[in-house]
Image (cartoon, grey):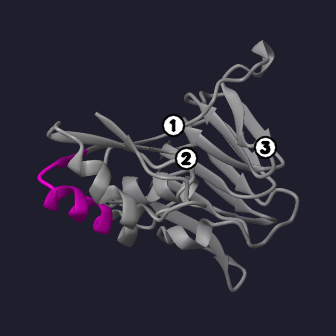
């Protein structure tokens, strides 16, 4: 059974979720989080509310980038909610929020290059030999093993986030770095950003990926 969180402009999910759960007879509950941007702390609290009501949290869907990354970092089953493109030529790339985000469903293979002047959320892998470039931020909901370039028009505050960040090359603005060689910690999303003029890789801070 899927429960939809209320419109954040009308009610807070903390106020409405207990009532929604009271009317649910299924053990496993999927949640449609809509536009809610939920941090790891928010999702931990949400999971506790679900458990206290005698249910088990199943899949989480959301149109908010932060919620997808937070859920993934916690090891929850999560997937982005998106609408299909009206144009056939747009195929797998569709704007979720046309002003700031391009969503692409599918793996980039050797020779592929996905590029946008908006932030990119790729639901799949970036294989060796493939490239992904954005004038803003890059998020890969999968393994990043190719080349990623965030801030390709010079934005030094751009970030690269992936569930497994092991690229051949990272670029942020004009700064270039090789990817780390050690194995990533299981279930932990990682981010790359500029610090003191060099690219630093560390556990993803979900709040830092919100619109700036």
As for residue 56 lying within the magenta part, the answer is: yes
Q: Secondary structure at mark 1?
A: loop
Judge depth for marks 3 and 2 and give the one in front. Answer: 3
Please identify the quarter of the rendering in which residue 209 is found.
bottom right
Residue 117 drawn at (x, y percent): 84, 48
Name the quarter where the N terminus is drawn: top left
Please identify the quarter of the rendering in which residue 130 is found.
top right
Residue 65 drawn at (x, y percent): 57, 53
Residue 153 drawn at (x, y percent): 88, 58
Residue of label 1? 125
Q: Earlier in the sequence, mark 1 or mark 2?
A: 1
**Residue 112 can be seen, yes or no:** no
State left or right for residue 34 relative to residue 9. left
Foreground residue, 6 or 142?
6
Q: Secondary structure at mark 2?
A: strand
Foreground residue, 18 or 58?
18
Foreground residue, 9 or 85?
9
Q: Residues within 10 Å of mark 2 (few under 14, many from 20)?
A: many
Q: In the image, which residues are magenta? A: 44-57
Indicate which disc residue 140 carries. 2
Residue 36 drawn at (x, y percent): 53, 57
Residue shown at the point (70%, 30%) measured from the top left = 93
In the rendered image, the vertical position of residue 91 relative to residue 135, given as above or below: above
Question: Are discs 3 and 2 less than 8 Å apart at CB?
Answer: no
Q: Earlier in the sequence, mark 3 or mark 1?
A: 3
As for residue 21 lying within the magenta part, the answer is: no
Q: Residues within 10 Å of mark 1 (few under 14, many from 20)?
A: many
Question: Are discs 1 and 2 less than 8 Å apart at CB?
Answer: yes
**Residue 18 can be seen, yes or no:** yes
Q: Residue furthest right?
A: 153
Residue of label 3? 98
State left or right for residue 175 relative to residue 20. right
């Amino acid at each position: 059974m899927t429960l939809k969180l209320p419109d954040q402009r009308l009610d807070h999910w903390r106020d409405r979720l207990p009532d929604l759960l009271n009317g649910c007879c299924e053990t496993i509950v999927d949640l449609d989080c809509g536009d809610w941007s939920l941090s790891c702390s928010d999702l931990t609290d949400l999971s506790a509310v679900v458990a206290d009501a005698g249910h088990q949290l199943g899949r989480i869907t959301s149109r908010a980038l932060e919620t997808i990354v937070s859920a993934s970092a916690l090891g929850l089953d999560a997937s982005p909610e998106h609408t299909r493109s009206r144009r056939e030529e747009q195929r797998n790339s569709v704007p979720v929020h046309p002003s700031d985000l391009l969503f692409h469903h599918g793996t980039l293979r050797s020779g592929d290059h996905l590029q946008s002047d908006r932030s990119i959320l790729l639901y799949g892998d970036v294989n060796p030999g493939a490239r992904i470039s954005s004038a803003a931020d890059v998020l890969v909901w999968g393994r990043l093993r190719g080349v990623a370039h965030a801030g390709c028009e010079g934005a030094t505050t751009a970030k690269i986030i992936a569930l497994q960040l092991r690229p051949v090359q990272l670029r942020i603005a004009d700064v270039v770095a090789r990817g780390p060689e050690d194995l990533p910690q299981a279930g932990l999303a990682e981010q790359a950003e500029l610090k003191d003029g060099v690219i630093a890789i560390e556990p993803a801070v979900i709040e830092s990926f919100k619109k700036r």
